[in-house]
Amino acid sequence: MCKKILAGNWKMNTTIEQGISLVAALIAGEKEIPAHVQVVVVPPFTHLHIVHQYLKNHGIMIGAQNCAAHAKGAYTGEVSAEMLASVSCQYVIIGHSERREYYGENAQILNQKLAQALRVGLTPIFCVGERLEEREAGSYFAVIASQLRETVAMLNPSDFSKVVIAYEPVWAIGTGKTATAEQAQEVHAFIRKTLAESFGILAAQTSILYGGSCKPSNAAELFAQNDIDGGLIGGASLSAEDFLAIARAF
Ligand code: 13P
């Protein structure tokens, strides 16, 4: 059975004070989180150390939103995977559509980032997903297959077994327009099938998360689908009440 994961991507939101109150509210509600669900908070880099101080005696884990493609050195403004591991991050999001779109991250860069994350023992949450025009043109399977084949499908099986996939249709991110449970399930099953071509049975154990306008009102239906193993939540993860409600939806 795949691990159930609920990750909250705060994106570029919250000051330190706001971040701390959000984490404090999650700790206060931690007992509401079902025992079989691993909750991960993914704050901005500046918050990771202090958030870890708050979470270290709790079951909630921390992740980062990005990491550098290089191990260390003269890369002003970058944060290495090793630095993230040193502040007790366990997860790192790689290939988010916002990174692909606004920062030109292509398959080559993403492969370097995957290698860096895996080298230091971070679990990559690797994102794929089609744009609106690709959905409307009916080319979304081809788009997602190539996003997978150029990146995670090239890992060795041992590294691949550590990777979590997130399906985030770009047209559903921050738009309030969620994929229906059927649309999401269709793509999740396709992702699993595509990964099985490279990794066989390992694909059955890969956690595949859904992301894109997931909220308390639609989470239960999404998580009830066979191939949906959790969520990568943006906007709704900025409210402890909503995020905990989504956790209860598993
Ligand atoms: P929203 O939940 O705000 O649509 O964002 C999804 C997302 O991009 C999470 O990484």
Image (spheres, rainbow, N blue to C red):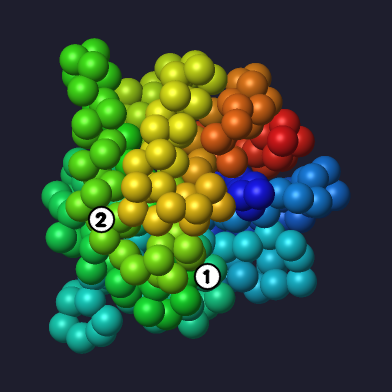
Lower position in the chain sequence, tag 1 or tag 2: 1
Residue 237 visible within the image: no
Q: Residue at x 65, y 38 (%)?
A: 243
Question: In the picture, which quadrant includes the C terminus?
Answer: top right
Q: CA distance from mark 1 to mark 2?
A: 22 Å
Q: How many marks?
A: 2
- Look at mark 1 in the image and give the residue it sits on: 89
Looking at the rendered structure, the secondary structure element under dot 1 is: loop
Mark 2 lies on a secondary structure that is: loop
Residue 47, percent from left and from top? 51, 64
Q: Which mark is residue 70?
A: none
Q: Residue at x 21, y 23 (%)?
A: 139
x, y percent for residue 117: 38, 71
Q: Residue 178 placed where, x, y %?
A: 46, 20
Badge 1, how many Cα within 10 Å: few under 14, some, many 20+?
Answer: many
- Residue at 22 percent across and 31 percent down: it is 142
Label 2 beta carbon within 8 A of ligand 1 = no
Residue 53 showing in the rendered view: yes
Specify the farthest residue to the bottom.
73
> What amino acid type is highlighted by mark number 1?
Cys
- When the figure is inspected, residue 228 is found, relative to residue 122, above or below; the finding is above
Which residue is under mark 2?
151
Query: Height in image: 125 above or below 53?
Result: above
Residue 68 picture quarter: bottom left
Left or right: residue 109 compared with residue 1: left
Q: Position of residue 79 (x, y in %)?
A: 32, 72
